[in-house]
Image (spheres, grey):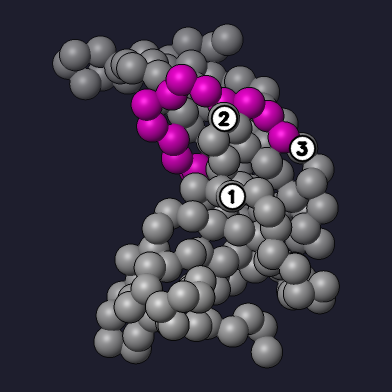
Amino acid sequence: MLYELTNKKDEESYTVHVLNSTKVCSLEKIDFGVASQDVASTGSGEYYLYNMEKQERSEQKYSRIGSLGDGKIYGKKEGGIDIFDTDGNLINSFELTGYDDFSKVGEMFVVQYGQTYRVYNENGDKHIEYIMKMERNLLERDI
């Protein structure tokens, strides 16, 4: 059994999300009454890494967990990003604060700060900065 999905009032319920790993998956906490075949998951946005071999859930709460390119997994948490290998070992962590929006594109992270967009790699290195003008033209500045 991968993980037991419960839907009892006094127990936590989770949706299992498959990642690019045979050892680690993510668990999304769901509200009571949602775990049903007839209802799409309306999760809480609260995710945890789950080690299937050790049958252990991480203590760290993430707002998003996903696959990141070749053999890596990322977890977006308050104040930053954690990068894991497919065994669930933390290999890097970097800070991201004060942003308005965040998205993962390929193996990069695009972070919006007002009208400015910054592109970071998995090490937290900033590669490019874009400024969005009112005409909706995208200007690129190398940093």
The relative height of residue 127 versus residue 105 in the rendered view (above or below) is above
Mark 3 and mark 1 in contact (Cβ < 8 Å)? no
For mark 2, what is the residue?
Answer: 79
Q: Residues within 10 Å of mark 3 (few under 14, many from 20)?
A: some
CA separation in Å, label 2 and label 3: 14 Å
Query: Image quadrant of residue 102?
Result: top left
Q: As rendered, which of 113 and 142 lies closer to the eye?
A: 113
Q: Is residue 68 left or right of residue 8?
A: right
Q: Is residue 57 left or right of residue 117?
A: right
**Is 117 placed left or right of 91 in the picture?**
left
One can see residue 108 in this view: no
| Image spot of residue 134 (x, y percent) | 19, 14
Task: Rate crowding at label 1 as few (under 14), some (14 to 19) or many (20 or more) other CA atoms within 10 Å.
Answer: some
Label 2 or label 3, whichever lies nearer to me, is 2
Task: Identify the residue under disc 1.
Answer: 61
Is residue 34 in view?
yes
Report, in whole angstroms, how far the alpha carbon at label 2 lies from the one at label 1: 12 Å
Q: Are marks 2 and 1 in contact (CB under 8 Å)?
A: no
Badge 1 amino acid:
Lys
Locate residue 81, reporting x and y percent.
62, 37
Q: CA distance from mark 1 to mark 3?
A: 17 Å
Q: Is residue 85 above or below residue 101?
A: below
Q: Amino acid at mark 3?
A: Asn
Across and down, in percent, residue 75 comes to: 61, 47
The magenta region covers 93-105
Q: Quadrant of the C terminus?
A: top right
Q: x, y (%) of residue 125? A: 67, 23
User: Camera-side residue: 138 or 114?
Assistant: 114
Q: Which mark is residue 92?
A: 3
